[in-house]
Image (cartoon, helix red, strand yellow):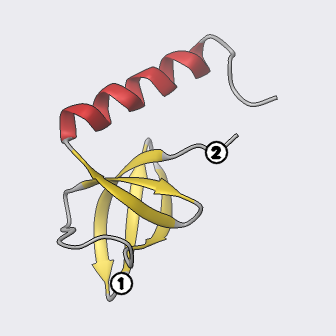
Amino acid sequence: MCLGVPMLVMSIEGDVARCEIDGVQREASLMMLDDVRVGDFVLIHAGFAIEKLDPAQAEETVSMFRAILAEGGGPT
């Protein structure tokens, strides 16, 4: 199963963004997207930002992930 995770762009250096969600930080390549700025939400998959997200859409998806994890429905 493939999973993309919405993350907030905290900083950008060249074509690499430092992204964060719930205290977890990751670096992601921005080579697949244009016009990404600090403060944007992006969908991260396999080390790449693959889509820029509307903040409301990102929060809705993150809320769903949190609910699944709270119910013990995380990866097995």
Q: Residue at x 57, y 18 (%)?
A: 68
Is 55 placed left or right of 28 in the picture? left
Q: Which quadrant is the C terminus positioned in? A: top right
Dot 1: what SS?
loop
Q: Residue at x 29, y 64 (%)?
A: 10
Dot 2: what SS?
loop
x and y percentages locating residue 43 in the rendered image: 40, 51
Q: Which residue is mark 2?
A: 2
x and y percentages locating residue 53 in the rendered image: 26, 47
Q: Residue at x 70, y 40 (%)?
A: 1
Q: Residue at x 37, y 74 (%)?
A: 30
Is 7 placed left or right of 75 in the picture? left
Q: Nearer the viewer, residue 63 or 57?
A: 57
x and y percentages locating residue 11 in the rendered image: 29, 72
> Relative to 73, is 5 above or below?
below
Q: Amino acid at mark 2?
A: Cys
Q: Quadrant of residue 60?
A: top left
Q: Which residue is mark 1?
A: 15
